[in-house]
Image: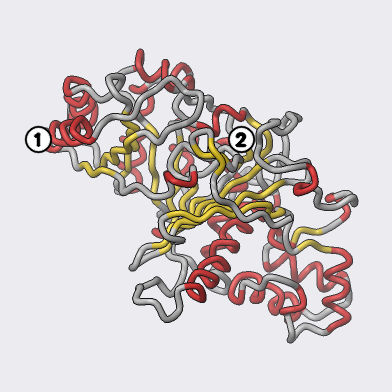
Amino acid sequence: MPGMPKNGNSGAARKKIPPRADAGYSDACIMISSSSPSERIALYNQTVHELVDLMASWGQPAFRARQVYRHLYVNVVDGLDAMTDVPRALRERLAAETDLFTLKQVGLQRGDDGLTRKALFALPDGSPVESVLMVYPDRATVCVSSQSGCPMACTFCATGKLGFLHDLTSGQIIEQVMWAVRELRVLAAEKAGQDIRLPAALGNVVFMGMGEPFNNYANWWATVDRLHDPQGFNMGARSFTVSTVGLVPGILKLAEERLPINLAISLHAPDDDLRVDMMPVNKRYPIRDLIDAVRAYVAKTNRRVSFEYVLLQEKNDLPEQAERLADLLRKPTPVLCHVNLIPWNPVPGTPLSRSNRRRVLDFQKVLQERGVPCTVRVERGTDIAAACGQLAGSTTVNGSAAEATFQA
């Protein structure tokens, strides 16, 4: 796509910020390699064409590249030795000069009877990355991070308290998806023989973890493009959802893309004064500009947009605020949209309160009575700090230690 750097792997880091002292894992857990990452090739950063070029530079035929590519995206191997149809000498060279994984898994937490799983990864400098697998009887969804930390500083979000640490490469985002595929296999083995229905495969990828995807546009879009490849992972376009705090240029750019993926927007307030207080990005892209961009997106794509609205007790959950939100989305003409209400998930050290169930339902009723499609999000992962707004590279929940398995 025009203006996209090769591989979509530009700008791994914009500034150096040391890991938080309370990140929840020790220095011993986060050491990955003493060699320089720039000296090695990250396999999940490579397109199939780049793998063909790599194999050619090693004197190997093109079909070897396609074998490796298939092992990466179809077989989803957990090690180079599992590529048994690749000659041993070639596997040894791959081991010497490439990395299958550049994220180091250092922690795993299980919640919801094992059906929600949060992985904690570390970058080479120790910066945290978290991913969440959510399994239901009919589907499995992985929530992936596009950055380590986040620069958006939303007041209700744990990730924003980390600040911005790094952009992730496309390969590092893809690695999170492949972790979810392998973890789903583990879950199936654990539940074998039990009276429980599980999906056969990963069905959805949502870019709703750490970071603002539109601040790392080239890399998250390269992820979508590669996972959509019918010769590889072959995930349908409608199985992807990207969430943004409302970066207008990114919304307009997405409207021009060839793949019809889903768009979700974090709104959380019906007016500028309140939204600026909750989301500093509103100073740059106020609500009217945001809604104008959404209308342009819908006009171009004819696709429905989801608005996410975190409910905070007596801050943005009043009936009159629901009325203003309905006016915003219905006047002068209705926006093709759906509102997803999210009772706030607690973040330690934040002076906010979660809306009670009665207030959530009252807010929903006001919207529905005014013709705004609206549902309340099913909660998953709150017991392991894996729910919306809780990802912060920590293994503590509400200030106390959570059950975790560390994989040093």
Residue 29, image x, y percentages: 75, 49
Q: Is residue 93 above or below residue 309?
A: below
User: In the figure, residue 45 lies in which quadrant?
Assistant: bottom right
Q: Residue at x 56, y 59 (%)?
A: 177
Q: Is residue 250 above or below residue 282?
A: below
* Residue 145 visible in the current orientation: yes
The circle on residue 174 is none
Q: Residue at x 77, y 78 (%)?
A: 81
User: In the figure, residue 318 lies in which quadrant?
Assistant: top left
Task: Tell me the mark number nearer the camera, choosing from 2 and 1.
Answer: 2
Mark 2 / mark 1, whichever is N-terminal: 2
Q: Which residue is mark 2?
A: 149
The one nearer the camera, 28 or 16, is 28
Residue 155, image x, y percentages: 47, 23
The one nearer the camera, 304 or 193, is 193
Count the marks.
2
Classify residue 51 as left or right of residue 278. right
Classify residue 167 as left or right of residue 64. left
**Mark 2 packing: few (<14 Cα in 10 Å), some, or many (20+)?**
many
Classify residue 26 as left or right of residue 212. right
Q: Which residue is mark 1?
A: 369
